[in-house]
Amino acid sequence: MSGMEFGTALASWLGADLAAELATPYDYADGAGFVDLRANGVFIPDLPGCAHGGIYKGRSYVFLGGMRGHDEITDHALIDIMTDNAGFPQPWRNRFAQSAREKVDLSFRHRARTQASNALVIFMPIKGPLSSARIEVLCDQDPILLNGTTVAGRIDDATIPNDGQWFKQFYFHAVASDPAVLSVPAGGRAEVSIALRWNGDGAPCAHVLALKLESDAGYLPKRRLTTDASGTGNFAVEAQGLSPGDQIAVKINTEHYTAIGKIILAVV
């Protein structure tokens, strides 16, 4: 398939004509990810688990190669497919790209802002195919899946903390490779080494990733850093105009998510 489809009531129990239409993803011109509402409102009398049937309300597409402009499919992305108050699927969105300016970090606050319910979440710490991403279906009953898709595992509500930050365990952070060497001479220059670690267990995150740097003092000759295949990298910082006793805080960011790490250097 060129994309991924998610519907609120899709299965082989649909009418024959609609089932045949749903078997092939809709080939839209720009492939940018959209909601297909064709045939929405069709009644499905024999929907499993629904004694009185159900109404098909459409499907939302995700295409990895169809973006235009500022790409939303990046490293450290979280893709939401939500439904509105009427139960219709909405276009997919990268939650971090949408909330980057406001820094809305809590999932329930994000949903409250959009007045929508989450139907499906794709955790994408590393940009790649959807087949390698962790996907969670959020619904009160067993989902109806197409194309031989199976449920890899279930998580009960009691397991998920009510803090709105469940997603963070699947992502990574940046730390100083040698925390004992974090100083820079006043008016001088220092090289700082960093390493990426998985949030869940602290293991090395061995990936080539493009990161952004910003500091609250001093000077960064380069504000972009690309890690090597082991997930490590280096950047230079200069303490121009600073005195012994000052500090330089360097924040490490991804494309849409800020502060996956902060390095504090003492000016000596």
Image (tube, grey):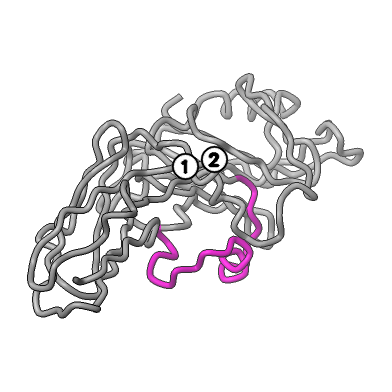
For badge 2, the amino acid type reads: Asp
Quadrant for residue 144, please give it: top right
- Relative image position of residue 86 (x, y in whole percent): 69, 59
Q: Is residue 115 magenta?
A: yes
Name the secondary structure under disc 1.
strand
- Find the magenta span and give its range: 97-120
Left or right: where 258 falls relative to 112: left
Residue at screen point 23% across, 63% down: 183
- Relative image position of residue 215 (x, y in whole percent): 24, 69
Crowd band around label 1 with a 10 angstrom C-alpha radius: few (<14), some (14–19), many (20+):
some
Quadrant for residue 214, please give it: bottom left
Q: Nearer the viewer, residue 103 or 121?
A: 103
Residue at which label 1 appears: 198
Q: Are marks 1 and 2 in contact (CB under 8 Å)?
A: yes
Residue 109 vertical position relative to residue 41 in the rendered view, above or below? below
Q: Is residue 227 magenta?
A: no
Residue at screen point 78% across, 49% down: 157
- The residues tagged by marks 1 and 2 sit, at their Cα atoms, a distance apart of 6 Å
Residue at which label 2 appears: 201
Residue at screen point 48% across, 28% down: 132
